[in-house]
Image (cartoon, grey):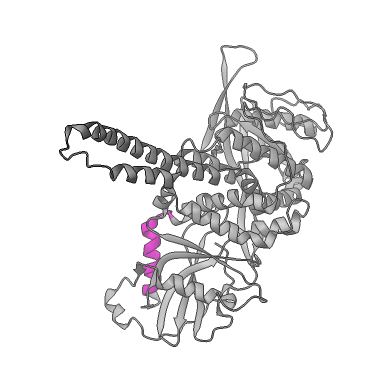
Amino acid sequence: MLVSGLFFVVAVMLMPQIDERCEEGWSHINRAAKALLVLGVVTLVAMIYSTIKAHLVDLLKDLHPGLVFSDISHFMRYAVKDIEQHLPNKCNEYQNANKCLIDKFLLVIPETCELVLPKTGEIRISEIKSTSSESERKQVSLEVVEQNGFQMDKGGNEDHYKVNIYKIKMDDQEYFIYAYVPKALTVIYQLSHKLPGMINVTLEKQRFQQLYQQILYAKGWINIVKLYQCKGTADVARALFDAATDNMDSANIKQKTATSGQGSVTEADIAPVVEVAANKSVAPQKKPVGALEENAILSTTPVRSARHPTVRDVIPGLAWDYVLNYLMPNLNHDHNNFQDKIETYLDNNSIKCGCIKKLMIVWVKSCDLERLLTEVANEGDSNRQVQLLDDISISDQTCSPFTLHVFKFTNAETKFERCFLAGYCAYMKCIQTMKTEFNDIASSSVLDQGQLFKKMFDEIMSIKAIQEQFRKFKVSLIYFDDDKGKSQRGRLIDMLDKEIRRSNPVIYLKTRAQISAHFQNETYQPAQQNVTPL
């Protein structure tokens, strides 16, 4: 369509010049040419806009499988294991302190897809109508009172995660709960603002919730994890208060407060109260284990029937989550200080060859995070070598610490040296998880998804709204087939060499006078620790 539109405009422009004086007999042709030219330009612009919009819509289609599996593989599967292990002792601890800790992990799904739970030091307030008087309103408060950390192994390194315990209170009723909003869900919220009109927030949120619920049942986690909806920030305290009272009845937990002293009614297998579009709650109903929540999600747009997603299905959401929730907040975090850290590192270590202002992320076909990046890069080439020098931490994220790994590339033949920042793509872990722990869901083509991820990543990074977020620090993703049976052509060292040489600008020492010895040979002690995936 674009080609035909362009041909149309060119053809009109080749007609007699509309500004030249013509014989009277040609005047009507000039007027027609002018009208056709305007129509052609408008048509071409409309075609270009339609093509761009269609491409964006295609990039934003079916994000929920990747978002769900990202959250489960990077957080939930570890959180459930840790909570199940420590929950009995934690409940006893709270009970001995005359407090009521709900023995469920409450997964909150906001209609807005925002992070609505309060951070440490914040308090969320919701107002609800009193049961005794329609005109009287009561306040429900929600605040963090405890953070429980746990660790998980990630490519030979330990990552630290935290699960918050919140205090929720209305009058003299006070409960303590584990609660969590899936961070991956915020991709939907961010895209609705960065690319307005391109994504159906309600539909994607519903599909996210439906698939998450399906996996909770499939993994047998439904006895510990319960899904609840809320409208947004102002409603989350009210929704979680309802959830706490509901689960207190369900688990037959006796509330120990100085004023109440009333025990709850045992009601096993009760479904959680879920807020629906009409702002009315669904009454608790008996239901068999394994059944999906009824009336949990309502929409004017029908939600497709749930099916087992394949590995290929998860790539779009996985790529968007990686860009928006992992790379962007870290690389945009205090940028000036970030560059200053690199300059300071070069200065403190008298590294005069400079460091390219680009982060290179490597995705290997095998998704093997255990093999050292230097080992993969240096294989089969004695002249060009990559050496791990050190790590630079650029943020203190609550969930997954973000560390930049400083490497040095050396070409012994040409004496060229340059430092660069690189590491494995951390989201290969999700593909590994699908392969090892979700065999009934994953397809057999696990190892072929790296190329699809790179294609999706490159298309996302080509969007203007996304490019603006990375204008000060570039990011590139390298896909490498590490199958040893393949030809040595296209080795990882070749790809790194090409990226390094064409990268500009270069960050140098703070002390500019020392750059005169730019290509001076130096000796470094390589870092011994494994590289945390980026």
Q: What is the residue that sits farthest to the left in this orientation? A: 21
Residue 302 falls in image quadrant: top right
Give the prevailing secondary structure in the magenta stretch.
helix
Depth check: give the residue in front, 26 or 391. 26
Residue at (69, 32) in percent of width and height: 244
Residue 334 belongs to magenta span: yes
The reply to whether residue 121 is visible in this rendering is: no
Q: Nearer the viewer, residue 384 or 157?
A: 384
Q: Magenta span has 105?
A: no
Q: Is residue 126 left or right of residue 261?
A: left
Q: Within the image, what quadrant is residue 115 found in?
A: top right
Specify the segment rendered in magenta.
332-347
Residue 72: image location, x then y, percent: 67, 49
The x and y percentages for residue 108 are 63, 37
The residue positioned 56% from the left and 35% from the top of the image is 201
Query: Is residue 145 visible in the rendered structure shown here?
Result: yes
Residue 283 x %, y %: 74, 23
- Left or right: 145 with respect to 7? right
Vertical placement of residue 418 versus 474, above or below:
below
Q: Residue furthest front?
A: 25
Q: Quadrant of the C terminus?
A: bottom right
Residue 144: x and y, percent? 58, 41
Q: Is residue 511 above or below residue 167?
A: below
Residue found 72% across the figure and 48% down from its top: 80
